Image (spheres, grey):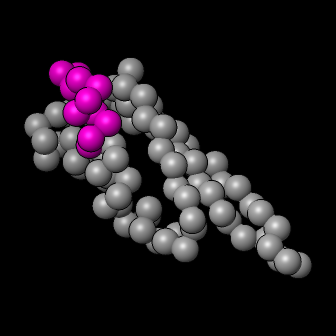
Amino acid sequence: MAFSFACDKAGFATRTVDTRASVRLARQGEAFVIDRIALTMQATVPGLDDAKFQEIANAAKRDCPLSKAPASVPEIALKATLR
C-alpha cells in the first residue's frame, strides 16, 4: 500500500502491485530469531520508468509502517520489478 500511495503522490496510477515476503529464521543459542526479510514486488505502473520505479519502491520500503515494525531484523531486502 505504501508503494501505491507513493506512486499516486508522484502522479502515477498503479495498475497492479504484488508483494511477497520471505522470512529467514536463524538459530541463536537455543532459540530462533528472524534475521532476514526479503521482499519481492512486481508492479505495473504505466508511464513510470525503472529508475523512478526503484526510487519510489525503496522510499516506500523505508517509510512503510509495516517495514518499520520489525526494526530489530538486521536485514530487510527488496527486489522490485517493473512489469
**Figure quadrant of residue 46:** top left
Q: Is residue 60 above or below residue 34?
A: above
Q: Nearer the viewer, residue 3 or 24?
A: 24
* Quadrant of the frame with the C terminus: top left
Residue 45 in picture, x, y percent from top left: 27, 27
Residue 77 x, y percent position in the rendering: 51, 49
Horizontal and vertical percent position of residue 56: 26, 43
Q: Give the residues in magenta.
A: 45-56
Residue at (55, 59) in percent of width and height: 75
* Quadrant position of residue 65: bottom left
Residue 9 picture location, percent across and down: 13, 47
Q: Residue at x 44, y 62 (%)?
A: 67
Instruction: Name the outermost residue toward the right.
Output: 30
Relative to 36, 43 lies left or right: left
Which residue is found at the position 85% from the left and 77% from the top?
Answer: 29
Q: Is residue 54 above or below residue 2?
A: above
Image side of residue 28 versus residue 13, left or right? right
> Is 59 part of what is drawn in magenta?
no
Judging depth in this view, the residue of 40 and 27 nearest the camera is: 27
Count the labels in the image: 0
Confirm whether the magenta stretch covers residue 55: yes
Kindly identify the residue that appears in the image at 17 percent across and 42 percent down.
Answer: 8
